[in-house]
Image: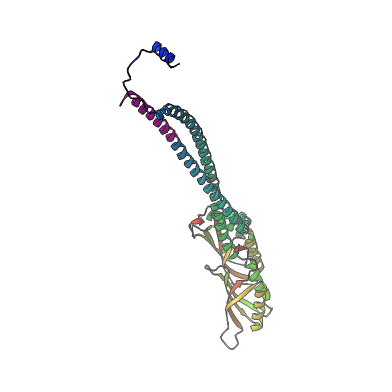
Amino acid sequence: MEKNTARICHDLKSDRVDIAQPLPSYLLFLPILFYSAIAGAVGLSLYFFLELKNAEAARDEWTTKKMSQQGLKAKADQEYKAVASESRRADDVVEWVEGADSIQPLILAVTRSMEAKSTITNLQLTRDRQNPDQLRFVLKFQGGGMLQLDRTKEAINGLGYRMYSAVHTRGQGKNSRAIDYQATLIRQRDSNFAQN
Amino acid sequence: MNAKAMACVFLGILIGGACYGTLTVHKKLAAMKEEESKAKSAYEDAESARKNAESKLANMRRDTQGKRDYLKEWLPYLQETKSAGDGERLMVARVRESGLTALSESYRSMGGNKNNAISNILQGKLVFVADYAKTMDWLGKIETSLPASRVASFKVSKGSSGNDIRTELVIDVPMYAANADAAKK
């Protein structure tokens, strides 16, 4: 058998002298390793490449979603600013309107509280610019005395005003019937919506 | 080194090259995965920030609803007098309608805080002598028809005859600035 094989080899290839040392037997695995490495590299690279494309698409999707969320946030921030600005304007208006109470009912109450024997000589209401809900009230009248003054004060209280820093003086002279009354009027409020 | 050994080295280099190429692609994949993870994290942050902003807006809307409704109720009256000219025309018309003859009548615009919604005030000073009932009627009408106006000062003294009274009235009419930059307060 060995003789036959040698003869076939002689037919294909002429005899030649080995010019190099034979390789160690474990290096017979080198071609197997080579083919495996090539196959593995192609397979893994293809898998990694597909994963890379998927990851890239996912990254772009997250970025788009993030931009959408940022857009919604910017819109909410803008609306917040608009609502806050409207709220501050409302504060200004509430502050103004609270200091813009109608004074006609107050004047009518004072004049109607006067009895026939009493006469108003001077009535003055001045609003404090810094605290517009405060009114400086000055009343000068003749006749009726303290009873008349009490009646007038009652009429003012009836409209929900409270009197502070009140001063009253009687006219000088023995027969003087004049009374000069000054006070700061502050309206009592029941509503507290403005504190919201 | 003989030819067989050279061939082995060559194969070894090719194997190494294949491994290196694969590792390079894997590195790119790892970097892209990290970018994806960062993008996802940024999205989650943005979503959380959006939710916070929307919650803040909802709270602000709820907390200021009363005030804003109040403003809406008053806007038609405030917008009647957007400028000093409007206010003056309105006041002059009201005085004429009343039939009262003013002894003196002057109007001036007073600047206020530009950041305030009531940025300007038109101040009208009127002096007239008229019947008490007519004067009270007119005062009531002007306070009703210009509900946002504010009587700054009202002085009454006895007139020269009968039921006549001398009235000195200072009235402030607000100029509403819808675009007041109250944020600068």
Residue A72 included in the magenta stretch of the image:
no
Residue A22 lies, in percent from the top left, at: 35, 25
Is residue B158 among the parts visible in the rendering?
A: no
Residue B17 included in the magenta stretch of the image:
yes
- Between A62 and A120, the residue placed more toward the observer is A62
- Between A86 and B58, the residue placed more toward the observer is B58
Q: Is residue A75 above or below residue A25?
A: below
Q: Report the magenta stretch's main SS.
A: helix
Q: Which residues are magenta?
A: B1-25
Residue B47 lies, in percent from the top left, at: 55, 47
Q: Quadrant of residue A11?
A: top left
Residue A7 lies, in percent from the top left, at: 41, 12
Is residue A92 among the parts visible in the rendering?
A: yes
- Between B166 and B30, the residue placed more toward the observer is B30
Q: Is residue A139 above or below residue A173?
A: above
How does the figure colour the protein chain or chains? rainbow
Residue A47 lies, in percent from the top left, at: 50, 32
Extreme residue in the top direction = A11
- The quadrant of the picture occupied by the N terminus of chain B is top left
Total label count?
Answer: 0
- Between A26 and B100, the residue placed more toward the observer is A26
Q: Does residue B134 appear left or right of residue B11 in this picture?
A: right
Q: Is residue B75 above or below residue A19?
A: below
